[in-house]
Image (spheres, rainbow, N blue to C red):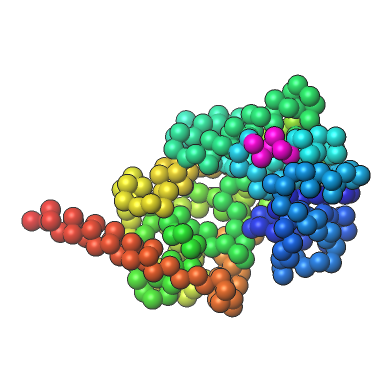
Amino acid sequence: MKVLFIGGTGTISLAISKALIHKGVELYIVNRGNRNEALGDEGVTYITCDIHDEEKLSSLIENMFFDVVADFIAFEPSHLERDHRLFKNKTKQFIFISSASAYQKPLSDYRVNEGTPLSNPNWAYSRNKIACEAYLMDLYRYEGFPVTIVRPSHTYGNQSIPISIKGHQGSWQVVRRMLEGKPVIIHGDGTALWTMTHTTDFAKGFVGLMGNIHAIGEAVQITSDETLTWNQIYQAIADALGVKLKAFHVASEFLAECSDYDFGGSLLGDKAHSVVFDNSKLKRLVPEFVATTRFDQGIKMTIEHYLENKTLQKQDPEFDAWCDRIIEAMEQAKNSVIL
């Protein structure tokens, strides 16, 4: 199988790339000349080009044909219009990575499958993904463009500590607060249901859809079957660190109003809602799919990797100070009404 990835070294795509290399797949990755140390050069052919330089990439792949092309970094319809021009006669399957955040918010049923309506008034990111899906499905219906849409939910690996409240520099500052014995903010009362999927499990499902004739024209979600509350998620992170969790619960609406961290989208448009994923369709298309990495096991590996790699430990004093201000404001409000 000959495969081309646009963005093959991110949180999700890196695990897929590794799985394909292990299987001996002929893998091509489009990037601007960077090399991911975790992936290396062996088993990968890099096409050095900025994906936005359509003319150059078109010339570089002029005489090439791929069994599968997957775009991991398309976020709006114009990106896919470009992809269609580049690959409409050059692949048997085009895979677009959408998002489970595109599903209806608020949900009319907490059980989510591919038939759940797509509607998210709270998050522009999700609305753009919905528009991307609509564009591609029209291409499939009217031109036969061989589209498969994949909807991941919260997928994590060694490069990503999965939490709900973080600053612009990522998750490390929350981990540091835990290590320092400081309270960490959890949205709502922490009892909303959520699903975490390890990248290696996601890769199993994704690879099973590649070259799968039954996946053409379909949208498929790939998640674990494990359901957790946000309290359990944060507790598992604290346990992996070997520290006591000091949870401080704050209403999602309040957090969205009191920051510039786009919590209006990521919370009110996503993580503040309980979701339980029904992966029956994936298991029908990929019968061998089983998510085997339990969250408390996977997060231990992630935490160990972070503690061993100083480059991942990006401090964020601005976010740290914001957390302190939120907590102080909530405590003051509570004290002001206590008689």
Q: Residue at point 53% right, 42% down?
A: 125
Q: Is residue 300 left or right of residue 330?
A: right
Image x and y of residue 103, in percent? 54, 36
Tell me if residue 61 comes above or below residue 133 in the rendering. Answer: below
Q: Is residue 30 magenta?
A: no
Which stretch did the figure color magenta? 78-83
Q: Is residue 82 magenta?
A: yes
Image x and y of residue 207, in percent? 77, 49
Tell me if residue 295 comes above or below residue 115 in the rendering. Answer: below
Q: Quadrant of residue 148?
A: top right
Q: Is residue 229 left or right of residue 73?
A: left
Q: Residue at point 84% right, 67% down?
A: 42
Image x and y of residue 246, in percent? 35, 67
Image x and y of residue 48, in percent? 78, 57
The secondary structure that most of the magenta stretch takes on is helix
Q: Residue at point 61% right, 30% down?
A: 115
Name the foreground residue: 260 vs 165.
Answer: 260
